[in-house]
Amino acid sequence: MINFKDNFENKIDKAEKNFIEINKTKYFDLSLHSGVMLLGHNNEVFKDILKKIIKYKFSITKSIDNKIHNKFLSIIKRYFKSANDLIYCTTGSESAIKSIRISRALNPKKSKIFLVSGGWHGSVDQTLFSSKKNLSPIPLSSGISENLRKSVKILPYNDIEKSKKILNRFHKQAACLIIEPIMGSLPLEESKSYLIFLKNYCKKKNIILIFDEIVTGIRTDKGSVQNKFKIYPDITLAGKVIGGGFPISLIIINKKINKNINKLKKNIFFGGTFSANNFSVYSSLKTLTYIDKNKDLVKKIIKNAYLIQKKLNNYISKNKLDAKVYRFDSFLRIIFTKKEIKNRIARDFLETKNKNKISKFSKFLYSKKILYPKNGIIFLSSQLRMTEIDFLIKNLSLGLKKYFQ
């Protein structure tokens, strides 16, 4: 049996659809490579992409021309209506770094960054901070310089009044505000009013608003949070599902940002060895084209996520368990407290007492051949069958009753 201190991903034998095989034992995967595999592991689209790359002897070397770029952009515009142009990156972390670079290039006299509590923007020194109730930035890693800590101000997610006070104090120094519009740490549709507030404030005070839709892009009804809520940022970060299993991320810029970048006397550096490489771009085009043609695919995943949420919450309520399932469209999260919460700071505070139980819950699911995500975000694929849904509901319910009654 795997030691839980180890990273099980290093021991994977193979994967297919919703399952990962470890040491010749199949486990249901609730992570799907942190949400990347919307179509399931080693799905037919992905396998066809690999066959075509081999058949046509593609080179990984970057050679994207205007025709391919325009085709890619036309698809992206359907999922992210703010899109005027895009910049190719390899990882979500890279797109976050370069979006901050854009913001500071366009606001050379401003250096501070507003982050929103509970968000995650990859392994990026400039954003690698958490916070407690006092909202002072706490580095998540060794090696983060004090200057970077001083350049960050954290806003409390879903708290308009407190956010407004902090914004009013520091807005003149702020180059940008970065937010996961819907957070994996607490997927709440009720966040719409907070996003509207941020949009209006940033527009009024000339702060570049960045939506990190690495997780929500493509997985959301109407393609993205911005499309669903009709709240359009200046810059959007996108990735994960888009690559279809190959590494790619995008910085999507609106018309105003594109125009201002082109006005700069000194160019912003965007280069990278694998940025816009042929493998990733081809995979992205094929994956997005397939999803685009199968209009009900994401809707089906959302329907299944809703069903799981409803049945689990009914079970939790009936048995008076200390938990609740939160959901935004296609992804879910179990919060291990029945108290109502509105941001990660409150979640962490209330869940601290259950830390040991949460670990036991995860190990219980492992014994039932279910891999519960380390980050707690449950992703579903288009390959999910009703028998598998029943299997998940049954064992998640048993685990919750065993440890949270």
Image (cartoon, rainbow, N blue to C red):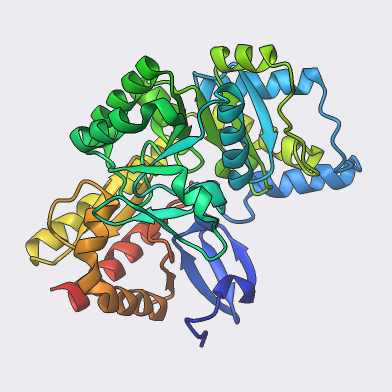
The one nearer the camera, 353 or 299, is 353
Is residue 381 something one can see in this rendering?
no
Residue at the (35%, 32%) spot, across then down: 170
Q: Quadrant of the C terminus?
A: bottom left
Q: Is residue 91 left or right of residue 111?
A: right
Please say if 66 is above or below 99: above
Q: Which residue sits at x=82%, y=23%?
A: 65
- In the rendered view, tell whether residue 398 sits above or below residue 105: below
Q: Position of residue 270 (x, y in %)?
A: 72, 33
Relative to the observer, which residue lies in front, 272 or 249?
272
**Residue plotted at (60% across, 31% down):** 251
Q: Residue 109 in the image: x percent, y percent?
A: 54, 26
Position in image of residue 37 (x %, y %): 56, 50
Residue sitting at 73 percent across and 35 percent down? 281
The reply to whether residue 69 is in sight is yes
Q: Position of residue 340 (x, y in %)?
A: 14, 51
Residue most toward the bottom? Answer: 1
Name above or below for residue 374 compared with residue 187: below
Q: Nearer the viewer, residue 257 or 81?
A: 257
The answer to whether 376 is drawn above or below residue 371 in the figure is above
Total labels drawn: 0
